[in-house]
């Protein structure tokens, strides 16, 4: 149903782990691996790639970081001069002209919202802005009720022909945090392909996109344990794929035995409590990140039913009790 989803399983090097211990890299006569990391978009952004010479590698990594900064300047809700901030300031009063990139992202967001029956909704931001996770502040019921009245993807009036967006509800806001990093890693992989790079991984927080393999063996992406730092619950061997993890441990505070985390159910404005983390493997990072947020809101049972019905998509879910669930396409460890 989602146009971005296509068959992925044929490109996974393996689903079960035992045979991977014997995989070996193809020896190279020249070239080497290069890596860079920066703090961008409020998270750690890294790129690792293979290039035949250091100059070519440096130019490719420069391009990746420049693209990450560009997307941050465009989509950050914290920068007053970003396109997103301009939309939030003006779209309640009039149709706001959008860049082609922003118009496409809003259209994709509406598509995900319609398809998920509102479990994914970028207009959750009217409630999201009421939380301060560093200070441990959560809204009271009256404030939350007011915010919920401004949530509703059906009231995002996108005119694709005119290239404009207007909000149909008073106090409405949007936030692209549901898939902005996934979009960013996709864009960076596209740039690396254009430069002739054949083996790379670009990561932004819990979102990664791998290009090719690791020269004869798959990229091994660990799924972290949401309650034990430094531990993992699964390892995914990937090739030409994207992976996104959403967890209740990223930004949160606890009060009265309740964990308030940044993954909000747009329909309630509150943090779902049925899941600790969701990892999605898909063809592209935008889809993977949007689905990781959607499945987190839906919970293990409904989330897995959704994923098992999508070709080329897989999931690893850690529920509230710490139990591991996986989609039908993944073999148990």
Image (cartoon, rainbow, N blue to C red):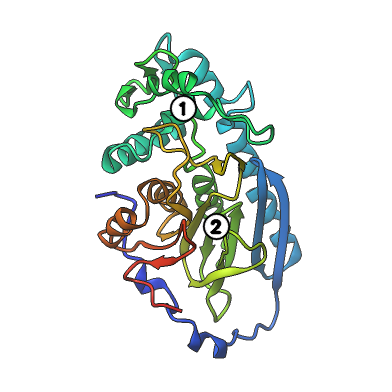
Asked where in the image residue 232 lies, by quadrant, the reply is bottom right
The answer to whether 312 is drawn above or below residue 189 in the figure is below
Q: How many marks?
A: 2
Residue 123 horizontal/vertical position (percent)? 42, 28
- Disc 1 on helix, strand or loop? loop
Label 1, on which residue? 174
Q: Is residue 47 left or right of residue 266?
A: right
The answer to whether 50 is drawn above or below residue 45 in the figure is below
- Give the farthest residue toward the bottom: 22
Which marked residue is nearer to the observer: mark 1 or mark 2?
Answer: 1
Numbered tag placed on residue 249 in the rendering: none
Distance between the Cα atoms at labels 1 and 2?
Answer: 24 Å
The answer to whether 211 is drawn above or below residue 151 in the figure is below
- Give the farthest residue toward the top: 93
- Disc 2 on helix, strand or loop? strand
Label 2, on which residue? 208
Residue located 58% across and 28% down the image: 77
- Give the farthest residue toward the front: 256
Residue located 38% across and 51% down the image: 295
**Lower position in the chain sequence, tag 1 or tag 2:** 1
Instruction: Judge by depth and name the residue closer to the eye, 172 or 197.
Output: 172
Residue located 60% across and 55% down the image: 203
Instruction: Judge by depth and name the residue closer to the eye, 307 or 106.
Output: 307
Residue 7 horizontal/vertical position (percent)? 32, 65
């Amino acid at each position: 149903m989602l146009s971005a989803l296509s068959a992925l399983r044929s490109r996974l090097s393996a689903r079960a782990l035992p045979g991977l211990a014997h995989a070996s890299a193809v020896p190279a006569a020249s070239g080497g691996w290069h890596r860079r990391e920066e703090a961008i978009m409020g998270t750690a952004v890294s790129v690792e790639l293979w290039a035949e010479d250091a100059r070519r590698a440096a130019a490719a990594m420069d391009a990746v970081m420049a693209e990450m900064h560009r997307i941050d300047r465009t989509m950050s809700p914290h920068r007053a001069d970003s396109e997103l901030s301009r939309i939030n300031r003006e779209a309640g009063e009039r149709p706001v002209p959008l860049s082609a990139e922003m118009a496409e992202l809003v259209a994709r967001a509406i598509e995900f919202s319609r398809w998920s029956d509102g479990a994914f909704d970028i207009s959750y931001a009217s409630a999201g802005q009421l939380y301060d996770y560093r200070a441990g502040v959560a809204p009271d019921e009256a404030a939350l009720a007011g915010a919920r009245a401004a949530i509703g993807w059906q009231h995002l009036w996108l005119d694709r022909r005119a290239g404009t967006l207007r909000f149909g509800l008073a106090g409405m806001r949007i936030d692209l945090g549901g898939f902005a990093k996934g979009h960013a890693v996709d864009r960076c992989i596209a740039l690396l392909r254009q430069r002739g790079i054949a083996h790379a991984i670009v990561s932004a927080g819990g979102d990664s996109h791998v290009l090719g393999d690791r020269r004869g063996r798959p990229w091994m992406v660990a799924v972290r344990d949401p309650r034990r730092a430094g531990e993992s619950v699964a390892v995914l061997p990937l090739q030409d794929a994207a992976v996104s993890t959403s967890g209740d441990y990223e930004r949160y505070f606890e009060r009265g035995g309740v964990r308030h985390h940044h993954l909000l159910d747009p329909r309630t404005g509150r943090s779902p409590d049925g899941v600790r983390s969701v990892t999605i493997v898909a063809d592209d990072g935008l889809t993977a990140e949007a689905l990781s947020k959607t499945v987190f809101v839906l919970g293990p049972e409904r989330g897995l039913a959704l994923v098992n019905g999508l070709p080329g998509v897989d999931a690893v879910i850690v529920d509230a009790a710490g139990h591991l669930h996986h989609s039908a396409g993944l073999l148990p460890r």
